[in-house]
Image (cartoon, coloured by chain):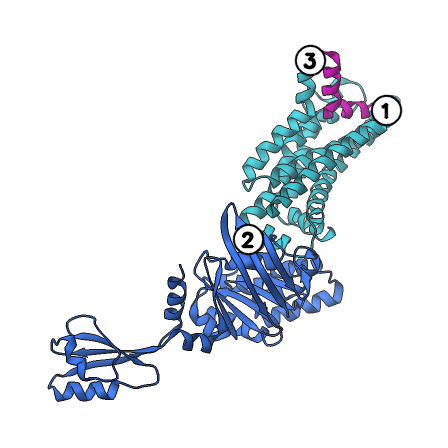
Chain colours: A blue, B cyan
Amino acid sequence: MSVEVNHLTKIYNHQKAVNDISFEVSKGEILGFLGPNGAGKSTTMKIATSFIPPTSGHVKVCGYDVVEEPMKVKGVVGYLPEHNPLYQEMYVREYLSFVGSIHGMKGVQLNSRISEMIELCGLGIEQNKRIESLSKGYRQRVGLAQALIHDPEVLVLDEPTTGLDPNQLMEVRALIKNIGQNKTVVLSTHIMQEVQALCDRVIVIDKGEIVANDKLEQLKNNQTTLKKVIVELDKEVDESFWDSLELAQQVQKLDQHTFALFCEIEKDIRQDIFKLVSESGIALLGMKQEEENMENIFHQLTQNHK
Amino acid sequence: MIQILVKEFNGFLDSLIAYIVIGVFLTVVGLMMWVFPETSVLEYGYAEMNTLFSFAPFVFMFLIPAITMRMFAEEKKSGTLEFLFTHPLTDWQIVLGKFFSSWLLVVVAIMPTIIYYFTLSEISSPAGNIDTPGIIGSYIGLFLLGGVFTSIGILASSITSNQIVAFVIAVFLCFILYSGIDSLSVLMDSSSTQVLLEELSVIHHYNAMSRGVIDSRNVVYFGSVIVLMLSITKIVLGSRKW
């Protein structure tokens, strides 16, 4: 196990940020850490990187306890904090060389490693600039390069893609995906597409508690039992109009012309709707089957949990 | 520790801080020493460097807090302290790296004034008629005083994320410790309290060193203040874990 979290609790001034959570991340896995703002994602990551100690419980990274052997933990973890703090006045190469030297690298080995990182993170044209003159996307890459320079076994990324434009977003995701092939990555985010694009497994956390810990597909299936079809008609009808539809489990009137019909996930109700509507001489203006998306799942998981 | 020292010192050289600090220090003491008639050695007529050694602490009182104010305050504000704390560095390595880089800059600023010694030695009559042991003692005193002020500045910087607050606190503490408690001692009734306050002040030990005798008590005093200030800094940094 690369990361083991055991009954972890963190209390800040009487406020429980993380409440008795346990999970494990195995080697080579990309884990998505999902939750609304203030759910305890960053706190968990700060504890796992030995920045702050837990109130109770244990966290082990590559077998090292974060409280007892912090220096070992810091040596095997690459961490990109939430707001990606960088020394603005340093040059990109100078900064990477500084980080490398902290990890005990020097000389030729350090130089070749810096060049490797610049190559990997696509910093080539910006490598001789000051960090303060870089765009947000490039700063994020410097942050990633910094986290990777000592070839860590575990990579902890706290909201690595916030504030990036769509192109940068794609590039940074591709980079993480690429890195994740042979490293353990724990990634926090509140963007659903990111989880879909990157992660093998998802942990949803809300108010300091784990509300789901599963593979993405599994999560989708668990949360959805009914499929929703939205139908728009050109005439006003009653809800009883749909009574003859056997497959419809539930009918909901959205406005005078629009209905939401729910049926079981394996069945398809659309043909029956079409027949029924056309037989009764009403024009069918529109019909749309809604996929249960990650946003809805996220919403359900974090709203139901009180 | 050495990585932090090198990084911070490069930072001084890379920004204008180093040049401004060295330039301002040398200009002020140079003017005092050779130009302003009230304090100039040339007007005074004796081959002594007392002007330098009595004014330098007051210049340092403002310059050293200016050097150290950003050390932790800026890192707190920009969040880079989290960077340092999540890399394989102990708190002591961080504190000492920052302390020694600042102290080194202070020492570099003092170094050029050694030329004054040789100049004075040349122009004194007869040539070489100058209190060499006293001057060496004073230099060691100034060097240690620079260390004390630097450690105070580092401490002040660690307790706030606002550089101006750090600066003002450091100037205040330097002043109190340098001559403030010494001046207060006059107000005390009992003579033992007077002596105690005098013994606690930097100026007492600094003046003692300028007599050319390196007394271990004085050196131990300077060393202890530095260790005390840096230890408090370390505790302040460790308070994130409470």
Tell me if I can see residue A15 in this picture: yes
Q: Indicate the chain on which mark 1 is placed.
A: B
Q: Give me the residue at 75% from left, 63% from top.
A: A107
Tags 1 and 2 both on a single chain: no
Q: Residue furthest top?
A: B189
Q: Indicate the chain on which mark 3 is placed.
A: B
SS for dot 3 = helix
Type of the residue with mark 3: Val
SS for dot 1 = loop
User: Disc 1 versus disc 3: distance between alpha carbons?
Assistant: 34 Å
Q: Is there a contact, CB below 8 Å, between mark 1 and mark 3?
A: no
Relative to the observer, which residue lies in front, A85 or A233?
A233
Relative to the observer, which residue lies in front, B57 or B25?
B57
Which quadrant is home to the C terminus of chain A?
Answer: bottom left
Residue A298: horizontal and vertical position, in percent? 40, 67
Q: Give me the residue at 63% from left, 53% from top.
A: B84
Residue A10 tag number: 2
Within-10-Å neighbours for mark 2: few <14, some 14–19, many 20+: many
Type of the residue with mark 2: Lys
Residue B186 tag number: 3
Task: Specify the segment rendered in magenta.
Answer: B188-214
Residue B142 occupies quadrant: top right
Residue A251 occupies quadrant: bottom left
Mark in the foreground, 1 or 2 = 2
Residue B89 belongs to the span the image colors magenta: no
Q: Indicate the chain on which mark 2 is placed.
A: A
Q: Is there a contact, CB below 8 Å, between mark 1 and mark 2?
A: no
Relative to the observer, which residue lies in front, A69 or A272?
A272
